[in-house]
Amino acid sequence: MRKLYISLSVIVLFALTGCSSDLYYASTFINKFERQSDKAVEQIYVALPQGVIHTNSSLNEVAGFMFMSEREQDSVIASKTAILNRVDDSILLSQFSSAFLYALSRTKIPIIVVSDPSKLPVADDQHFTVNFVQMELEEYLQPNESRFTTRSGVNYSYPYQLRHLSLNAWMQLDARDTLSEVYFRNREVEESFRGTVTSLRDGKATLKTHFDRLTPADAYHTAWNLGIECATLYVEKILSEYVCRTKGTNQTYFYYNPACNCIEDVVPYDEGIKTSFEKL
């Protein structure tokens, strides 16, 4: 059904926008690496992230934190931190980097990993470059409240906090004769809460609560998913820019699927670019 939907959407888009040539050039670019064509001369150079900054944003809301003693600060940090101090950065980075390289390798474009970002070549039509300049693992608590009303009209509320974890990536992509432009992408996961009223006696409510708490495994899983997402969006960026260089213009955004190494769907460029990297 998915393939049928894609086929119909492409046919309709051809008729409405005349983007068939855009899709032709983008598809040709992908296929030449599958066929190992002599024209497949492009290469991707990647400088993978080397470290992770740990940030607990909840500390910003603690009044007078900067003026506390070191022991007081340590106590506050411990009370508001559940993940950052338990995550192994080497595992986190390995998950992200492995996923990024795996998804990128699906294109069959040769990938060269460099350990020193200064060794990246100058980007041009045959040399694509990626430099992960900073990675940040951010943890914070979000206040929430569960409200309910009894049949007799009595209002109750149950305040609680949900922990959020965000992996943030800043990267420089394909600077051509200019200063490298910085792009941003992140992926977030959060805890969930379920509450059930078990009794209402003497004007008091008893609530059975259940929290799905975050663990370091959630951080590693988020890193893998963000790596796949960044690689996928980067290929979409390559396709869009390739069509633009080839035709002098591009009206189409291509949704790339690394699972099949194919263009999964097409939409007007201005619409699709909103789902891509944030340009800083």
Image (tube, rainbow, N blue to C red):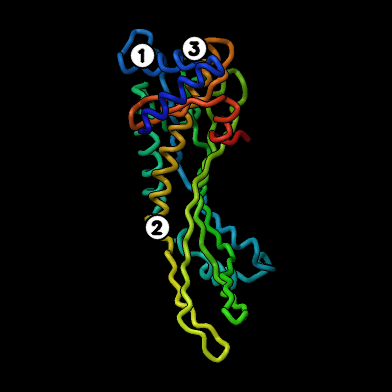
Label 3 amino acid? Answer: Ser
Rendered residue at 59%/58% (across/down): 57
In the image, is residue 9 above or below residue 95? above
153 over 214 or under it: above or below: below
Nearer to me, 75 or 243: 243
Q: Quadrant of residue 34?
A: top left
State how far apart marks 1 and 2 are (Cα). Answer: 41 Å
Residue at image mark 1: 32
Q: Which residue is mark 2?
A: 216
Circles 3 and 1: CB atoms closer than 8 Å: no
Which label is found at residue 21? Answer: 3
Q: Which numbered tag is attached to residue 191? A: none
Q: Name the foreground residue: 258 vs 202.
A: 202
Going from the N terminus, do you reach mark 3 or mark 1 first? 3
Give SS at disc 2: helix
Asked if residue 148 lies left or right of residue 218, the reply is: right
Confirm whether residue 120 shows in the render. no
- Mark 2 vs mark 3: which is more N-terminal? 3
Q: What type is the residue that disc 2 sits on?
A: Pro
- Residue farthest to the front? 151
Q: Quadrant of the N terminus?
A: top left
